[in-house]
Image (cartoon, helix red, strand yellow):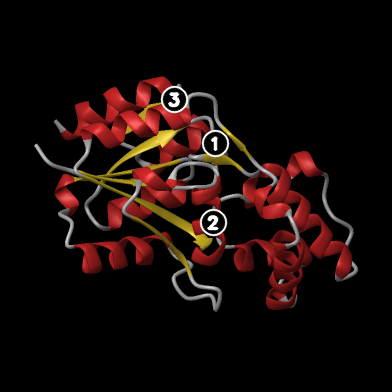
Amino acid sequence: MSYTVLFDLDGTLTDPASGIIGSFQKALVDLGHAPPPFESLGWIIGPALRLSFPKVMGEGADAEAAVERYRHHYRGGGMYDLSLYDGMPEAVATVRGQASRMFVCTAKPEPYAIPIVERFGYAPHFERVYGAALDGSLDDKADIIAKIIAEQGIDPKRTVMIGDRLHDIHAAKRHGIASIGVVWGYGGAEELTAAGADRLCEKTGDLPALVAGLMG
């Protein structure tokens, strides 16, 4: 049977910690804030950064200025400072052979997400990369999924969302879409289970069978 697969990017297809967290810390320094330790900032990967900066800088802080400084450093090299999870390119290729359609669905702005997908070899497997806009619109993952449904005419009942954070799972549920939580990212099994993921994937090599089982 035909079905569609939506893949999150950060924490699912790629491990972007070095570039994202490093750029986040530099932005804080630029604005006169002492940055938290690198190892304590994994939680910023996934949700929109304009929502994350106030949690560190304090409510009422100029989140837009922080995002602009972040983008300055990220565009300067941080966006490509990432790695691929072992076995993920092979898993994606296998899932593509099973699925009718595949899209990247990320809260990262499209102007950053598209070149990353292209540079690291994922582009041939996806029809299109859907992400947030630089002006802050479409920051919500559920809104991005809504755009995919509207533009591509996919059937939510024959679609699965694959991601590493609760935001992915919650967004899928809002549209009646099944979800697989990957534990190698930044949410972990406890967060994904609490969010209501339909399946958990612990190893990249297990992903194709989980997708086929859920959509079969």
Q: Amino acid at mark 1?
A: Gly
Mark earlier in primary sequence (2, 1): 2
CA distance separating discs 3 and 1:
11 Å
Label 3 secondary element: helix
Image position of 176 with respect to 193: above or below: below
Label 1 secondary element: loop
Q: Quadrant of the N terminus?
A: top left
Label 2 secondary element: helix
Task: Give the class, few, some or many, for how many residues have Cα within 10 Å of label 1's Cα (few <14, many ≥20).
Answer: many
Q: Which circle, 2 or 1, is nearer the viewer?
A: 2
Q: Residue at x 74, y 55 (%)?
A: 77
Q: Which circle, 3 or 1, is nearer the viewer?
A: 3
Q: Residue at x 54, y 36 (%)?
A: 185
Label drawn at residue 204: 3
Q: Amino acid at mark 2?
A: Pro
CA distance separating discs 3 and 2:
23 Å
Q: Quadrant of residue 34?
A: bottom right
Label drawn at residue 115: 2
Q: Which circle, 3 or 2, is nearer the viewer?
A: 2
Q: Quadrant of residue 138?
A: bottom left
**Residue at the disc numbered 1:** 185
Q: Nearer the viewer, residue 14 or 143?
A: 14
Give x and y (percent) for residue 31: 86, 71
Mark earlier in primary sequence (3, 1): 1
